[in-house]
Image (cartoon, coloured by chain):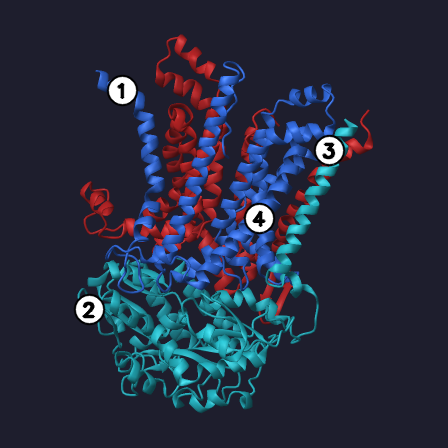
């Protein structure tokens, strides 16, 4: 028996060795593994390779050629991760790293206006060096140059912009023209709204005649109560991300609050699905490129920002994602390449088209107050 | 007399695994327990204030979602048993040379990601699909009704996704059944039904209980099926925990809810272990505790 | 009368087969839609038949990367969890020792913990220990939740294990190492293999725990969850169908191999010593 146990010890040792070997192998071959656990100082780069760049963005938010071409032309090895599905979720995952001055290897993150502002206020973002962003500021369209949340573009550069409004099956719900029409009992159980509070709630407030940009916490809560009522009576079928589209293609959903760019793409799937500018106005937003603290390679990030602000490069992205392009001159490039896109109101909206629109906002008040509103909205969704 | 070395062998064998579980399960649970008693916010930081009101408040506020989770999970486990028992029985006793193949078919869906399968159910169950038309024809679903975005769809999704966890332990206990007992029953002129109710079912009780636990537990904490198949009034406690953690960033409440969910399940488990012993859950009937 | 009897005889089998159809129906849908030719970006309605996406299954780079990452992750999870779990199982079955019940409990409780709780707890742990989230944290988490399942599978194999075989080998003068290699290991192998397969499957299929602990890394299920927002590419169906087909083929190979082995054994020793067919999982 003693002999037997000896052999078992050997097996055990071997097994352990194999395990340790495999774990180290993976850790080294992987993403830098536990490197974040050494307590290096804040904002110091983690293994910053001057010729590599890691970007965190949303799924299917870029065409397949831009990154390879950028790599080739600028000689910057680029890792493009599609790991942002939701501003809040993403924030929850990266928050503690950023709080410790680490970026998790990222040099660019793409987040929506209010999230960029939230991160900036918490000190998670780097101040941009405008001297290194000459192409960006030469080409940025005027209306995006000084948004309320970042008047001097100190920390954010728009990636793409868009409108939040109505998406309607024009064959099944031809008379939906305003947000209030979504509450028409005729469409009971065939209406969805976005699970992003800042998309949905301001539009509902606007429908009730609230001056959205000066809305109080009470206004927000009143709109949320209205939503709750319409959840309780079965009017609203679901709160969704962009996946309401699936229900709409089938006709299970006939009207929804949704985003402009994805609707443009639906044209080819089903020409009866239209974006309708709500009578009350729409919500305007941008997703922004930001550079987090501790970014290993800010210079590569600047290179990338300048690169995508070249109209010809931007045109390629716009053709694929169909959102509003922040780059002046893109339309001119596209007029030659693809006039349909160049003349699309949703991709190159005129001032007239967006005259009633407001910039997307967060609830007023401090962190605790905002969290309370967010919680109230979540309680409606998970009611 | 065993030598010291011999006595240390089992600890050596278990060491790495238990350390892994301790470091990456017990300690995180402890952290979470601590977090659940803190107050504060993401910006300002958290402080341990033994805030037991995190528990009382969130339990009373979300009792609906708790009850709904247990109700859905309960119905889903029951349906799993109803579907899984004949399947496991067929595999164990009737499949003959097809036994292994059928068993593989039970496990195979694991390899086509859970999410894709759930999304496929959306295609199968949309408002105009043939399945829904049949259900309407049979008056199971009202004429102006729907299946997607209802409790029924969520329960169906849970049943579907966790069925293998029911079939496998059932199969294991049926397979292990001493067939001579069944023959004895027959010899004593028991009818097939009697043999089943008096012999087969009681002897496979441990398998049934293991199967019910293995389906009920993951189903009770699930939130994915609600996201894909549910509507507005189907959120389970898993959805609340997920949104508290990842959307609202209210970590203490999220931790308190997680702990409560786990505590309830643990109580059920302890009752079960008292009844059947840890061994039974692990497919080991020889070791009665 | 005969028909009735036949029906009675085969009723259970019929219900079983219906249940299997229920389990496989979504997979059929997935496979069918892998040949769809959607007009736009959404692959939910049948438009027309094409094999285009089967010809370029790996054309979408982020998808392929996610798949490769998931396979790598599942592979190392299977190795890690199988080693740790097998050792645990051996200790629990073969030895009497102080603390055995506690060990049993520590193995059972993770299985009794909802995934959302494990995911959240691990996230707070990794965050407060300032681990960088990524592949390593995923591997740690996946090994953690797979261990218990491995223990169960290997354990049930060990319990049915005839220790007299080992003793016989020892009596015949085999050294302990030889005994382990030539007797213990081969007999244990099917159980260990099933355990490895199960942990591979659990890992490649996991969404909830991964969603909490992935950091910047995107696994196959996470990719699908994200892509679902903007239209799942047909390639996802193609790859899912491939994964399924590969699994089925591997399983068939195992079955055929087993049949052959059985037949040979039957020829060798016609009666009592019939090898029990090893059951995966």
Q: Quadrant of residue A267?
A: bottom left
Residue C49: image location, x then y, percent = 25, 54
Near mark 4 (Cα within 10 A), the count class, few <14, some 14-19 or many ≥20, is many
Check contact, mark 1 vs mark 3: CB within 8 A.
no
Of pointers 4 and 1, the one earlier in the residue sequence: 1
Mark 2 or 4, closer to the camera: 4
Q: Chain of mark 4?
A: C
CA separation in Å, label 4 and label 3:
29 Å
Q: Chain of mark 3?
A: C
Q: Chain of mark 1?
A: C
Q: Nearer the viewer, residue C181 or B164?
A: C181
Q: Nearer the viewer, residue B62 or A95?
A: A95
Residue A155: image location, x then y, percent = 53, 82
Check contact, mark 4 vs mark 3: CB within 8 A.
no
User: Mark on residue C98?
Assistant: 3
Near mark 2 (Cα within 10 A), the count class, few <14, some 14-19 or many ≥20, is some
Q: Are marks 4 and 1 on the same chain?
A: yes
Give the residue pinned by disc 1.
C6
User: Mark on residue A170?
Assistant: 2
Q: Are marks 2 and 1 on the same chain?
A: no
Q: Quadrant of residue B2?
A: top right
Relative to A329, say whether B236 is above or below. above
Give the residue pinned by disc 4.
C77
Q: Colour of chain A?
A: cyan
CA separation in Å, label 4 and label 1:
47 Å
Q: Residue at x 64, y 42 (%)?
A: C84
Near mark 3 (Cα within 10 A), the count class, few <14, some 14-19 or many ≥20, is few
Of pointers 1 and 3, the one earlier in the residue sequence: 1
Mark 1 or 3, closer to the camera: 1
CA separation in Å, label 2 and label 3:
72 Å
Q: Nearer the viewer, residue C234 or B142?
A: C234
């Amino acid at each position: 028996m003693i002999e037997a146990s000896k052999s078992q010890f050997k097996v055990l040792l071997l097994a352990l060795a194999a395990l340790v070997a495999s774990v180290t192998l993976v850790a080294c071959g992987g993403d830098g593994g536990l490197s974040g656990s050494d307590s290096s100082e804040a904002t110091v780069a983690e293994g910053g390779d001057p010729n590599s760049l890691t970007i965190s963005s949303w799924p299917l938010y870029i065409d397949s050629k831009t990154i390879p071409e950028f790599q080739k032309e600028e000689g910057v090895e680029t890792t493009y991760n599609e790991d942002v599905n939701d501003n809040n979720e993403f924030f929850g995952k990266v928050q503690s790293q950023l709080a410790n001055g680490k970026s998790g290897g990222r040099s660019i993150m793409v987040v929506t206006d209010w999230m960029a502002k939230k991160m900036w206020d918490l000190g998670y973002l780097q101040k941009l060096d405008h001297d290194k962003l000459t192409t960006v500021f030469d080409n940025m369209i005027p209306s995006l140059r000084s948004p309320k949340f970042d008047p001097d573009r100190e920390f954010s550069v728009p990636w793409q912009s868009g409108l939040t409004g109505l998406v309607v099956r024009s064959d099944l719900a031809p008379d939906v023209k305003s947000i209030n029409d979504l509450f028409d009992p005729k469409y009971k159980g065939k209406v969805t709204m976005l699970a992003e509070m800042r998309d949905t709630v301001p539009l509902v407030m606007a429908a009730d005649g609230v001056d959205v940009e000066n809305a109080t916490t009470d206004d927000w809560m009143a709109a949320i109560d209205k939503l709750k009522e319409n959840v309780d009576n079965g009017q609203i079928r679901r709160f969704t991300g962009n996946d309401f589209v699936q229900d709409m293609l089938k006709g299970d959903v006939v009207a929804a609050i949704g985003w402009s760019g994805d609707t443009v793409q639906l044209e080819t799937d089903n020409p009866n699905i239209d974006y309708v500018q709500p009578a009350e106005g729409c919500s305007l937003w941008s997703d922004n490129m930001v550079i987090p603290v501790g970014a290993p390679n800010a210079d590569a990030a600047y290179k990338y920002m300048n690169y995508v602000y070249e109209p010809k490069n931007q045109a390629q992205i716009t053709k694929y994602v169909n959102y509003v392009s922040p780059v002046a001159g893109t339309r001119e490039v596209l007029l030659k390449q693809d006039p349909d896109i160049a003349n699309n109101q949703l991709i190159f909206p005129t001032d007239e088209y967006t005259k009633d629109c407001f910039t997307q906002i967060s609830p007023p008040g401090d962190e605790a107050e905002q969290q309370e509103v967010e919680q109230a909205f979540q309680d409606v969704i998970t009611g | 007399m065993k030598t010291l070395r011999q006595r240390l062998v089992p600890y050596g064998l278990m060491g790495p695994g238990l350390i892994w579980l301790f470091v990456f399960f017990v300690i995180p649970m402890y952290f979470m327990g601590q977090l659940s008693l803190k107050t504060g916010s993401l910006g300002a930081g958290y402080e341990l204030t033994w805030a037991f009101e995190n528990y009382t408040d969130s339990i009373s506020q979300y009792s609906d979602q708790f009850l709904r989770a247990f109700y859905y999970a309960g119905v889903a486990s029951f349906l799993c048993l109803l579907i899984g028992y004949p399947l496991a029985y067929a595999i164990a006793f009737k499949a003959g040379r097809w036994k292994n193949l059928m068993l593989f078919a039970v496990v195979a869906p694991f390899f086509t990601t859970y999410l894709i399968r759930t999304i496929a159910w959306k295609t199968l169950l949309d408002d105009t699909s043939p399945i829904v038309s049949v259900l309407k024809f049979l008056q199971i679903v009202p004429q102006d009704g729907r299946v997607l975005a209802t409790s029924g769809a969520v329960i169906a999704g849970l049943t579907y996704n966790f069925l293998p966890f029911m079939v496998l332990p059932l199969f294991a206990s049926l397979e292990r059944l001493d067939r001579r007992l069944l023959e004895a029953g027959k010899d004593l002129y028991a009818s097939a039904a009697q043999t089943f109710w008096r012999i087969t079912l009681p002897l496979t009780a441990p398998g049934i209980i293991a199967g019910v636990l293995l389906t009920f537990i993951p189903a009770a904490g699930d939130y994915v099926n609600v996201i894909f198949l549910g509507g507005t009034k189907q959120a389970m406690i898993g959805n609340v925990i997920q949104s508290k953690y990842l959307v609202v960033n209210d970590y203490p409440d999220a931790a308190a809810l997680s702990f409560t969910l786990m505590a309830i399940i643990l109580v059920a488990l302890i009752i079960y272990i008292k009844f059947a012993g840890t061994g039974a859950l692990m497919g080991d009937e020889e070791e009665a505790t | 009368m005969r028909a009735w009897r036949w029906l009675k005889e085969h009723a259970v089998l019929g219900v079983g087969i219906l249940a299997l159809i229920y389990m496989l129906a979504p997979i059929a849908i997935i496979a069918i839609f892998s040949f769809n030719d959607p007009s736009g970006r959404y692959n939910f309605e049948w438009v027309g038949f094409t094999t285009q996406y089967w010809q370029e299954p790996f054309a979408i780079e982020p998808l392929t990367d996610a798949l490769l990452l998931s396979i790598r992750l599942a592979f190392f999870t299977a190795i890690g969890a199988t080693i740790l779990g097998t050792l645990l199982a051996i200790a629990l079955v073969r030895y009497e020792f102080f603390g055995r019940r506690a060990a049993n409990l520590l193995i059972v409780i993770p299985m009794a913990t909802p995934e959302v709780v494990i995911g959240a707890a691990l996230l707070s742990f990794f965050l407060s220990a300032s681990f960088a989230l990524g592949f390593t944290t995923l591997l740690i988490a996946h090994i953690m939740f797979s261990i218990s399942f491995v223990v169960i599978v290997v354990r049930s194999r060990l319990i049915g294990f005839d220790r007299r075989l080992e003793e016989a080998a020892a009596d015949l003068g085999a050294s302990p190492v030889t005994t382990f290699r030539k007797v213990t290991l081969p007999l244990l192998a099917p159980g260990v293999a099933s355990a490895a397969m199960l942990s591979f499957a659990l890992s490649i299929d996991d969404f909830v725990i991964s969603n909490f602990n992935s950091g910047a890394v995107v696994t196959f299920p996470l990719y699908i969850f994200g892509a679902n927002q903007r239209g799942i590419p047909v390639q996802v169906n193609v790859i899912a169908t491939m994964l399924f087909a590969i699994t089925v083929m591997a399983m068939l190979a195992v079955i055929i191999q087993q049949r052959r082995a059985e037949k040979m054994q039957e020829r060798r020793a016609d009666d009592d010593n019939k090898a029990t067919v090893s059951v995966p999982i």
